[in-house]
Image (cartoon, rainbow, N blue to C red):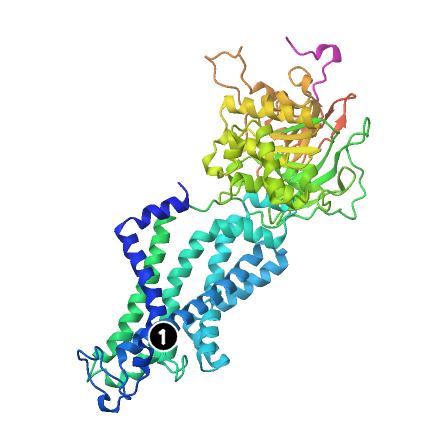
């Protein structure tokens, strides 16, 4: 159920009906009041000075004989105008300070965050009083003082909300598409935090109303001849013990209007109560792919043979603060039209390798490589990245913006990179949805990701990659959490996309069986290293590294004895920051020797198609490496 539907349902409740009535009455009073009662409110009557409440003057008269009830009604317009003006100033200022850290560089983002922390350390009331003195006594000074005074609190809220959204995969996808900072905030971050922000604004409005009335009551706000409810209270303070009803009108107006703001906030809260913000790993800052200096060692990559690689990575390293190395000197290449798979256990560095290629390693990780080239250029600096390189993330629900329709998200690629207008971009989006076998794409394009099944969302991610003319599709665990039937459909779709578009595929998975259905070549990673590279056809009979053989042995097939427990690999992979000498697989390897525990093997070629990093590889003759029928 959408937010609009939940809001309509909430408005049909007693609370919603009361709120609608209050919201309608308040503007009517603010508009009509000065028109009907302005003359009465300003009329001086020296014969009725200081009177108490009566049928003619409900709340009595002031020191000039003016009707307090009429003045209270007339003051509604100015009070609401000033309250809304201060709320807008606070909201805009808070949004700017709160949202900027998500799109700025880490250093500048820290400075903005430090500024917000410094401002929020001061009590809001003292900060407002200080600003009121700085800006001067009067209406303008009070508006600026209160508006700026609530900026730090509002900025802190925006920072927390924006940080929980900025790390989502769909924001990372927008960055890789080359979406500008302003568009990123307005289109991808703001819609996903709009509901809690609106709730806070309405509830803050009540506090701003009270603060403004307080400044006027203290003589720092509205000055004569203008008046708001706070000034009316100030004028009747001396009579509160003799004629208390004279202060009732302004006080009741402040309380009731504050309740109206809170009622609106409560309705928004109930309407959005079943919708939460999706959290994701922090990816608000890219790790810069830079060239390491001072390392003269030659790469262990294989000699370049065959066609010029479409993607070539030479000695990629991904490090985290503290010196923890998550990816160690990984070198790989993908030829045009080729499908290459990267497999390994969780934590082996597969996804980090893929993210580093696209320049999307999660903060505070940093990626460095001797070189990363895509079609001959640096992929993180090429403006064609959004159309030539497509990335399919492992969680499509986190990769798609839940606040936007499917059609809008797909059409953004065509608008940003292909220069299409909205009509042309939407037409292409519908065509791409049809290409990935989404039924009734015209209708589905107007739906949101939450209305799609898991398989449909994954198809949509592939369609998003096809909005341009991709030469390389990076699929990071594209079948995770999908049932076997949908998994087969997604893999078949990837094969079709590759055949029709001629795109190369770099597929990340922990499932060797899945990779073998799509790829011609497989790279096996363990503890951030590539330990073996071989053709897919050699997976069953031609593996050389003990780790790869253990992975293959752990995959059950139709001949597996069901009476026996499933085969597992003893021990555990090295944890983050564990840097032991020798081969990282040695503690779990049955073939390990003393040399394995002291010297780390290099990735070396054992024949024309295979490389392995092992001191004791199991070399199988070529004639024995045949796939069983």
The quarter of the picture where the N terminus appears is: top left
Provide residue 292's location: percent of width, then percent of height: 75, 47
- x and y percentages locating residue 138 in the rendered image: 44, 81
Residue that numbered label 1 is attached to? 213
The magenta stretch is 617-629
Is residue 628 highlighted in magenta?
yes
Question: In this picture, is 41 found above or below 500?
Answer: below
The one nearer the camera, 227 or 146, is: 227
Residue at 81% over, 30% down = 304
What residue is rendered at 79% in x and 48% in y? 294
Task: Name the residue at the top extreme.
Answer: 629
In the image, residue 221 sits, relative to residue 529, either above or below, namely: below
Q: From the viewer's perspective, is 26 left or right of 243?
A: right
Q: Quadrant of residue 46?
A: bottom left
In the rendered image, is residue 522 in sight? Answer: no
Q: Residue at x 54, y 61 (%)?
A: 96
Local crowd at mark 1 within 10 Å, few (<14), some, or many (≥20)? many
Is residue 359 something one can see in this rendering? yes
Task: Give the percent coordinates (x, y) of residue 131.
Answer: 48, 76
Q: Is residue 358 above or below residue 152?
A: above
Give SS at disc 1: helix
Say left or right for 530 vs 187.
right
């Amino acid at each position: 159920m959408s937010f609009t539907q939940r809001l309509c349902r909430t408005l049909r409740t007693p609370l919603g009906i009361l709120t609608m009535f209050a919201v309608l009455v308040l503007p009517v009073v603010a508009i009509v009041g000065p028109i009907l009662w302005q003359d009465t409110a300003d009329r001086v009557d020296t014969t009725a000075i200081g009177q108490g409440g009566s049928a003619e003057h409900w709340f009595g008269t002031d020191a000039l004989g003016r009707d307090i009830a009429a003045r209270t009604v007339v003051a509604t317009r100015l009070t609401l105008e000033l309250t809304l003006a201060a709320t807008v100033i606070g909201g805009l200022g808070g949004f700017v300070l709160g949202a900027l850290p998500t799109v700025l560089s880490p250093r500048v983002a820290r400075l903005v965050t430090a500024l917000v922390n410094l401002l929020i350390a001061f009590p809001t009331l003292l900060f407002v009083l200080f600003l009121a003195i700085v800006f001067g006594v009067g209406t303008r000074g009070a508006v600026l003082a209160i508006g700026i005074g609530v900026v730090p609190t509002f900025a802190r809220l925006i920072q927390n909300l924006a940080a929980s959204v900025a790390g989502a995969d769909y924001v990372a996808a927008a960055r890789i598409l080359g979406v500008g900072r302003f568009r990123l905030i307005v289109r991808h971050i703001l819609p996903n935090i709009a509901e809690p922000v609106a709730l806070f604004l309405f509830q803050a409005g009540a506090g701003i109303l009270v603060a403004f009335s307080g400044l006027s009551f203290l003589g720092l706000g509205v000055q004569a001849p203008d008046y708001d409810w706070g000034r009316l209270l100030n004028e009747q303070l001396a009579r509160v013990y003799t004629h208390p009803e004279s202060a009732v009108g302004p006080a009741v107006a402040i309380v009731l209007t504050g309740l109206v703001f809170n009622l609106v906030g409560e309705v928004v809260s109930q309407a959005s109560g079943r919708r939460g913000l999706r959290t994701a790993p922090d990816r608000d800052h890219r790790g810069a792919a830079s060239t390491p200096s001072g390392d003269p060692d030659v790469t262990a990559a294989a000699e370049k043979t065959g066609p010029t690689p479409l993607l070539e990575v030479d000695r990629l390293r991904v490090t985290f603060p503290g010196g923890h190395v998550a990816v160690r000197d990984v070198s790989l290449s993908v030829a045009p039209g080729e499908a290459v798979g990267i497999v390994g256990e969780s934590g082996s560095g597969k996804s980090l390798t893929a993210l580093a290629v696209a320049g999307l390693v999660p903060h505070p990780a940093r990626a460095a490589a001797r070189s990363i080239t895509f079609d001959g250029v640096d992929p993180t600096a090429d403006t064609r990245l959004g159309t030539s390189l497509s990335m399919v993330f492992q969680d499509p629900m986190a990769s798609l913006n839940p606040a936007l329709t499917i059609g809008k998200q797909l059409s953004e690629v065509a608008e940003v990179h292909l220069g299409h207008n909205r009509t042309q971009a939407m037409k292409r989006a519908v065509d791409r949805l049809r290409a990935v076998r989404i039924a009734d794409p015209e209708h589905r394009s107007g739906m949101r990701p939450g209305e799609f099944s898991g398989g449909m969302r994954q198809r949509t991610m592939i369609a998003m990659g096809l909005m341009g003319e991709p030469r390389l599709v990076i699929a990071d665990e594209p079948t995770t959490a999908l049932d076997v039937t949908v998994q087969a459909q997604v893999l078949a779709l990837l094969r079709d996309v590759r055949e029709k578009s001629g795109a190369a595929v770099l597929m990340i998975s922990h499932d060797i069986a899945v990779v073998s259905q799509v790829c011609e070549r497989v790279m096996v990673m363990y503890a951030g290293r590539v330990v073996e590279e071989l053709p897919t056809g050699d997976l069953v009979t031609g593996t050389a590294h003990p780790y790869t053989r253990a992975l293959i042995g752990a995959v059950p097939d139709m001949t597996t004895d069901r009476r026996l427990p499933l085969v597992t690999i003893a021990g555990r992979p090295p944890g983050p920051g564990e840097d032991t000498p020798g081969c990282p697989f040695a503690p779990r390897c049955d073939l390990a020797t003393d040399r394995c525990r002291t010297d780390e093997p290099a990735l070396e070629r054992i024949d024309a198609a295979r490389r392995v990093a092992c001191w004791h590889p199991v070399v199988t003759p070529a004639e024995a490496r045949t796939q069983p029928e």
